[in-house]
Image (spheres, grey):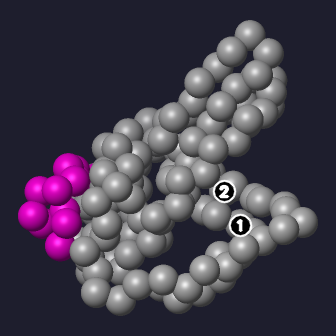
Amino acid sequence: MQSYTIGQAARLLGVSPDTARRWADAGKVATHRDDSGRRLIDGRDLAAFSIEVAQNGTGEDDPSYTSARNAFPGIVTAVKLGDVAAQVEIQAGPHRLVSLLTREAVEELGLEVGMQATARVKSTSVHIDRG
């Protein structure tokens, strides 16, 4: 299972490394240390926590006022395989993205809960809202 440093987790959650560190210090997400002493978060734990953060808000004071770009780096939070098709969910900061693709594509990419992935979106109609 893939593990993430505090900095990597912060980027995937869409928060500052200081915020991710405070959450870890407060026990909101479990960490462990690698052989070199770095604090790491298990991918499955980070996937579950990313859903919680997205549902309950980040607790950071300044919301982001930006138009989302077409690439959303995040963490895989669910993989549902059918006989031919599959559904993959990615939590990219506050954004939950769901993709329907072939089972073969999921297997070739080796997608599983807790791993880092990037959702790329192509659309002919993009709506922009400012909170």
Q: Is residue 123 left or right of residue 109?
A: right
Q: Is residue 98 visible?
A: yes
| Local SS, label 2 | strand
Give the percent coordinates (x, y) of residue 59: 25, 74
What amino acid is found at the position of numbered circle 2 in the picture? Answer: Thr
Task: Say which residue label 1 marks.
Answer: 71
Q: Which residue is mark 2?
A: 118
Residue found 65% across the figure and 31% down from its top: 87
In this picture, which residue range is highlighted in magenta? 22-34
- Check the image and report above or below for 36 versus 69: above
- Identity of the residue furthest to the top in this view: 83
User: If the image is split into quadrants, where does the N terminus sit?
Assistant: top left
Earlier sequence position, callout 2 versus callout 1: 1
Q: Is residue 26 magenta?
A: yes
Q: Where 114 falls versus 7 (above or below)?
A: above
| Magenta-span inclusion, residue 51 | no
- For this view, does 89 lie left or right of residue 93? right
User: Is residue 118 found left or right of 95 in the rendered image?
Assistant: right
Give the x, y percent position of residue 46.
Answer: 36, 50
What is the quadrant of residue 125 in the picture?
Answer: bottom right
Residue 25 in percent (x, y) is at 12, 66
The reply to whether dot 2 and dot 1 touch (C-beta < 8 Å) is yes
**What amino acid is found at the position of numbered circle 1 in the picture?**
Ala
Q: Secondary structure at mark 1?
A: strand
Task: Name the residue at 78% across, 71% down.
Answer: 126
